[in-house]
């Protein structure tokens, strides 16, 4: 439904050099899906979103919605933002303090070019307030709403015009951690209910994993990987992606050979030989980084049998941190310290010896070239 091809957006910051904010950005968002642009501050994700909205003018590329171009450098097309029929919610909700909830949601309809009679306006506004769970607060002053309610009101105002495309720029960043978690479920419910094609921008990996059908991870103006949340987390394409999405342990490795089982390789590391997984093709001697998620390291209750040492390590517990439902352990294996996340009942005492094992499909080899 949304197609972005070879998008370049650049601008000059004062008298300084040209900032190459978005470089060769290409992706597609199917009808009704939520697509997230994820990355650290300054990676180009908000510039990409603003280019789609028409708030930034790219220098090259194409942006189409349902096959209709809203920007094309080759065809010299630039549709102004107010003609694109996109809804957008910013970090700042920009709620009108002198209006109640109903009037805030109705505002885009009252100032738009299309005219609605009183009943049509009432039905449209109350329908969208019901979708975001605010219909019972229609007459409340906007300043009397909680942070989560204001976020939903800003969303209702974006939805009331029935946009072709919904653009969300860090909409939960101003909420506290507990409310942010609650609002993830609300956003997912609303998006699933209305089947709106949505582009979501965030630097929060948890939000991206919880909400998205697909994620594009960005770094230094470019997309470095696109995939489902599970693919991005379990099969990172680069060391940057593995490190940015959640926590991970890295081991330096060198490919020895392909195993008889497809997708698995044998690699040497400072901690011994490992059987590892990768979707890439390697050659013997290739240098790789092995990514091992803390929750994928199994703490063994006893030393494994002598013939069962595949991906097994022996270590000493250096440190433990109790987090309630889990415990994080720093375990020293040789000269390396590994982060291990386990059930509180599985962690050993500081100074105790323990054995660790990692399944081959959870030990991901990433090329370093």
Image: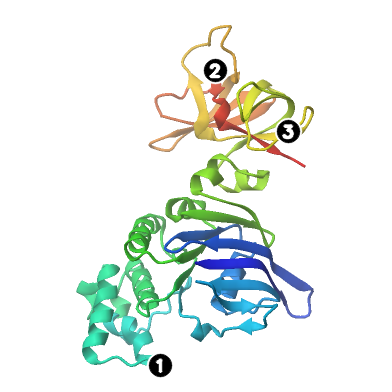
Vertically, is 77 above or below 253?
Answer: below
Residue that label 1 marks: 113
Q: Can I make out residue 42 in this image?
A: no
Residue at disc 1, secondary structure? loop
Query: Is label 3 in contact with label 2 (beta carbons under 8 Å)?
Result: no
Tell me which label, 1 or 2, sits earlier in the chain.
1
Closest to the camera, between mark 3 and mark 2, is 3
Q: CA distance from mark 3 to mark 2?
A: 30 Å
Q: How is the image coloured?
A: rainbow
* Label 2 environment density (alpha carbons within 10 Å; few <14, some 14–19, many ≥20): some
Closest to the camera, between mark 1 and mark 2, is 1
Residue that label 3 marks: 282
Q: Residue 63: x percent and y percent?
A: 59, 72
Residue that label 2 marks: 355
Q: CA distance from mark 1 to mark 3?
A: 59 Å
Q: Nearer the viewer, residue 365 or 162?
A: 162
Tell me which label, 1 or 3, sits earlier in the chain.
1
The quadrant in which the C terminus is found is top right
Q: Residue 313: x percent and y percent?
A: 60, 19
Residue at disc 2, secondary structure? strand
Q: CA distance from mark 1 to mark 2?
A: 69 Å
* Label 1 environment density (alpha carbons within 10 Å; few <14, some 14–19, many ≥20): few
Residue at disc 3, secondary structure? loop
Left or right: where 177 falls relative to 282: left
């Amino acid at each position: 439904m949304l197609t972005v091809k070879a998008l370049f957006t650049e601008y000059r910051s004062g008298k300084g050099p040209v900032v190459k904010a978005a470089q060769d950005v290409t992706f597609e968002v199917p009808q009704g899906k939520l697509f997230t642009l994820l990355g650290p501050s300054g990676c180009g994700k908000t510039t990409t979103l603003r280019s789609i909205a028409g708030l930034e003018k790219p220098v090259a590329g194409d942006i189409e919605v349902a096959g209709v171009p809203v920007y094309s450098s080759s065809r010299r097309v630039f549709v102004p933002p107010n003609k694109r029929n996109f809804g957008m919610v910013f970090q700042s909700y920009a709620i009108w303090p002198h209006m109640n909830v109903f009037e805030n949601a109705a505002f885009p309809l009252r100032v738009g070019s299309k005219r609605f009679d009183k009943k049509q306006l009432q039905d449209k506004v109350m329908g969208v307030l019901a979708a975001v769970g605010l219909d019972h607060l229609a007459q409340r002053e906007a300043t009397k709403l909680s942070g989560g309610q204001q976020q939903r009101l800003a969303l209702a105002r974006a939805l009331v015009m029935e946009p072709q495309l919904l653009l969300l720029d860090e909409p939960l960043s101003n909420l506290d951690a507990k409310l942010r978690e609650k609002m993830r479920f609300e956003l997912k419910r609303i998006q699933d209910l209305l089947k709106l094609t949505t582009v979501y921008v965030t630097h929060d990996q948890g939000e991206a994993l919880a909400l998205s059908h697909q994620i594009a991870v960005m770094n230094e103006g470019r997309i470095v990987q696109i995939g489902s949340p599970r693919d991005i987390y379990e099969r990172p394409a680069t060391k940057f992606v593995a490190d940015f999405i959640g926590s991970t342990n890295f081991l330096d490795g060198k490919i020895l050979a392909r195993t008889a089982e497809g997708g698995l390789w044998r690699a040497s590391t400072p901690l011994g030989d490992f059987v590892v997984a990768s979707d890439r093709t390697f050659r013997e001697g290739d240098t790789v980084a092995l990514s091992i998620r803390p929750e994928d390291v199994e703490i063994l209750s006893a030393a494994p049998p002598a013939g069962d040492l595949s991906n097994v390590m022996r270590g000493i517990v250096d440190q433990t941190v109790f987090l309630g439902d889990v415990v994080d352990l720093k375990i020293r294996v040789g000269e390396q310290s590994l982060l291990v996340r386990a059930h509180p009942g599985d962690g050993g005492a500081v100074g105790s010896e323990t054995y660790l094992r990692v399944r081959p499909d959870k030990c991901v080899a990433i090329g370093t070239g």
